[in-house]
Structures are given as structure tokens and as C-alpha cells.
Image: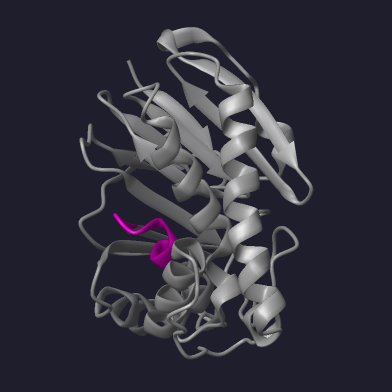
Amino acid sequence: MNETIVFQSRDYRDFDQSGGFKAFRVAVETSDLYVKALVSLERETEALIRECRSQIEWAISRRPEFLTSLVPVEEDPADPPPAARMVRAGRKAGTGPMAAVAGEVADYVGRGLLKWSKELIVENGGDLFIQVERPVMVGLYAGSSPFTGRVGVRIQPTVIPLGVCTSSGTVGPSLSQGKADAATVISHDVALADAVATALGNRIVRPSDLKPALKWALDISGVMAAAAILGDTIAAQGDIELGPIA
């Protein structure tokens, strides 16, 4: 049985309990997570969100550029692990640390919840932490593009957590300097997938940008695959399987 997760505004969250998963939402300030796990873990999820946010907020309090910079910042040995991972992701992607924040929160929460559920899908604003023993179809939401709701990325069972992160220049509140309807990156490093998805989207303004932008993403160590949608054009490179959403 395939589970289907679709990137779009948060009204897509159906909280269907089929397939053995318990679906629930936990929101803490600006972090709004949707989780599918084998058991209900609302309290554990809230605690992990707060842990992660407090460490990131501590890093911001020490150096405000952590929050505001759109370009990489230097690593600081005092940074707690979530902040350090965001800095490293941004340095690889050429972005500021906050380009990786949603992916890092999803990763932190997902890895923490594996203690109670061996299968998990954690979604945070279109960025996913996935560890499953069944195929998962991640639908690509690309605004008014004809591919929205029709095309997805098939994720095979994985015993190692996987990140699938999407940025958009036309959908949602995230800052993007490009015009891609969807820029999706796959990596075992969820923070890296998030930061590279942002940078990938920034590089796409016209259809001729798709191929070189995807090649740029695949040249980053740790990136497994990338896909991008601009209007009625879709392109993908790397270890990725696109398919129709049933």
C-alpha cells in the first residue's frame, strides 16, 4: 500500500488513520508539524519541537546574523547541534542558516520520535523527514502548474531517514529569488535538502535554467536527486523516480 503526501498549503492535511499510521498535528509558535507515526505521539512531538527551537533561538541570541543573513555564515564551535547543522547546510548551498530551519526541525523531531515509532513521516511546511518500510508517493504541489496533484516522487522503503524538501517562488510564504513553482531536493541530510531546495529555486527564472540549476544541485555532496517545475515544464536529475499520483 502506498502512502501519499502532497506538498501544498496546510489544508491538505487529511489526518486519515489508514495504513497503520496515526496522523496528528502539533504546532509550537511558528513551527506547524504534521506527523504520521505508528502510535500517537503528540506530547513527545511538542517536547522535541521546543527542544530544537530553543537551541536555534539560543544561537540567534548570540549572533543576530544567524537569523537575518541570506549568505553563509561562519561556523561557531559554541553552536548547539541543530544550529551547527543549519550553518553547514547553508555553507554547502550558499544560503543563510535559516534556509535550513524547517528541514532541521523536521529532522530533529523525526529522529527523536524514532524511539517510539520505527516508521515516520514528519512534514514541516513542505519539508519532509521520512523513514518507512513501505513505498511513499510524495506529490509535488506546484501552484497553478498542470503538474500539481498529478505528479509525485516515489520513495522506496528506507532504513535510513530521508529528507524530501521543496521550495517555491510562487507558492507559500518562503523567500525565493526565483520563479520555480516547485524546486525539490532529496538527501539523507534533511537540513541540507531544505537549504539546497531554496538555492535551487533561486536559480530558476526561465525554462532554460532548469537543466543547469539541477546539475548545480547534484554537484553538492550529499544531494541524491533534485526536480523542478516551472509552469508546464518539469525536469529531474539523480536517483529519483517520478510517477503519476493515482
Q: Quadrant of the N terminus?
A: top left
Relative side of 15 to 213, left or right: right
Instruction: Please tell me which residue is depicted at 54% across the width and 10% down the height of the picture.
Output: 17
Q: Can residue 244 be seen in this snapshot?
A: no
Residue pictured at 49% horizontal, 66% vertical: 80
Horizontal side, residue 227 vs residue 194: left or right? left
Quadrant of the image occupied by residue 13: top right
Residue 115, by quadrant, is top left
Residue 97 is situated, as x and y percent measured from the top left of the image, at 55, 76
Q: Position of residue 212 (x, y in %)?
A: 34, 84
Note whether residue 103 is visible: yes
Could you tell me which quadrant the C terminus lies in? Answer: top left
Q: Residue furthest right?
A: 29
| 158 to 186, vertically: above or below | above
Can you say whether 153 is above or below 118 in the image? below
Q: Which residues are magenta?
A: 187-193
Measuring 28% from the left and 78% from the top, which residue is drawn there? 220
194, 2: nearer the viewer: 194
- Closest to the observer, 43 or 213: 43
The single residue placed furthest to the front in the displayed view is 78
Q: Residue at x 41, y 63 (%)?
A: 193
- As for residue 30 lying within the magenta part, the answer is no
- Choose between 225 and 121: the one closer to the eye: 121
From the top left corner, tell me how far across and down residue 188 is, in percent.
29, 54
Q: Position of residue 75 (x, y in %)?
A: 44, 85
Observer-nearest of 132 and 171: 132
Left of 234 or right of it: where is 240?
left
Callout count: 0
